[in-house]
Image (cartoon, helix red, strand yellow):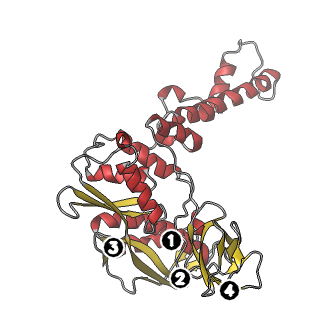
Amino acid sequence: MPQPEFSAPEWMEENSLDEIHERMMDNLPADIDQTPGGFPYDFTMPTAIEKSKFIEENLMQALMLCFPQYSSGSWLDLHAGQVNLTRHAAEKATGKLLITGEPGTEIESETMFYVPATANSETVEFLSVEEVVIGEDGTVLVDVAASEAGSKHNVGANTVTNMDDPMDEITAITNPAAMTGGADEETDDDLYDRIAVEYQNNRTYLGNDIDYIRWAKEAGAGDCIVDSAADGPGTVTLVLVDTNGEPASNALCRQVYNYIVSPEDRSQRLLPTACAKLTCVAATGFEVNFKVTGLQYANTTINEIMDEFRKLVKEVFSDAKSDGVLRYNDVRPLMSDIAGVDDFDTFLLNGGTVNVPFSKEEYPVVGVLDFS
């Protein structure tokens, strides 16, 4: 949600350093020396400096912090608390490793595995969450969780291939599927958007689409597609993505369902009584590939440009979701918004220069970025 420009009250005007000091000098008796560099001039200047700083900086910031639109950090958390919201904490990515080795080999809980570092990325570490034993077929699946919370641990399939303390009995390590569920702490912008919804007049508990979207985001989802009457009257299906714009994990789907339905405590139930059935499913990722050639840039790198493009295009994805189409002319201009990019020759969206439609159950996700 765009932030409106803050307008200072009129009584704060005409309080610059020079204006304050000039008033102080004018209030001195007429027979007092007012020459710059003289004792009265130099003696009053420090007071004028501190007063102007207090009014133009400290008091201005204090006024802005009174409103969620201009707050940040812990101050925005206080505004959220006023409407019974809390900032979503960072979450750890989870997944499974397929380990091959000598049958009977024990792998202890909290054994560390990792994605090797490259020239452009750091080591990404995972810890086993249980003790397992390699079976008679020479393999075992072990549940792992990221060593720390954050989206950077959402790595692709077949990337976690190393063990911190290698064992001779283990011959191969890999993750058959991508690690998912890792999320960064909710940003100020996203938290403010949720606060703003609480103050909107269209906030209800009737089970309108906006209610389901709000409830899903309160439970930790990044976005939500509402499919009303999915299986007939009285049924609703929520198609979910996480805060990274990726299809929601099974854990996140359960989290959203439990938050809305509250099966353990009906007094906390948000789901309207008239709704007989709620289903929460992960969105089907509709992979969108991008190719850019002839990039001209300065004071940045190809990898930094791609990272920034991923962030920008996910904002466009959110808008495109409601229309069911990703428009070429909405995405191409993003390149010009990236700091350091001077020009480029070709911009292709899934190999072409036309709009890309997708179904209601699909959610666009960033596929291959081929920038050169």
Question: How far is mark 3 from mark 1, CA to CA?
Answer: 16 Å
* Front-lying residue, 15 or 259: 259
Q: Separation of disc 1 and disc 2 at Cα?
A: 11 Å
Disc 2 and disc 4: Cα gap in Å? Answer: 40 Å
Q: Residue under label 1, please give it.
A: 309
Residue 340 in the image, given as x and y percentages of width and height: 58, 71
Local secondary structure at mark 4 = strand
Where is residue 201? Give x, y as percent: 29, 40
* Residue type highlighted by circle 3: Arg
- Give the percent coordinates (x, y) of residue 316: 40, 66
Q: Disc 2 to disc 3, how far (Cα)?
A: 20 Å
Instruction: Please tell me how crowded label 3 is: few (under 14), some (14-19), or many (20+) other residues with Cα within 10 Å.
Output: some
Instruction: Look at 58% across and 36% down and name the residue there.
Output: 61
Q: Amino acid at mark 1?
A: Phe
Numbered circle sitting on residue 101: 4
- Which residue is disc 2 drawn over? 371
Q: Residues within 10 Å of mark 1 (few under 14, many from 20)?
A: some
- Residue 212 pos. (x, y %): 32, 52
Q: CA distance from mark 4 to mark 1?
A: 41 Å
Say which residue label 3 marks: 327
For label 4, the crowd category at 10 Å Cα-Cα, with few meaning under 14, some 14 to 19 and many 20 or more, is: many
Q: Are marks 2 and 3 in contact (CB under 8 Å)?
A: no
Q: Secondary structure at mark 2?
A: strand
What is the three-letter code of the residue carrying label 2?
Phe
Around disc 2, counting alpha carbons within 10 Å, would you say few (fewer than 14), some (14 to 19), or many (20 or more)? some
Among the two numbered marks 3 and 1 on one chain, the one whose residue lies closer to the N terminus: 1
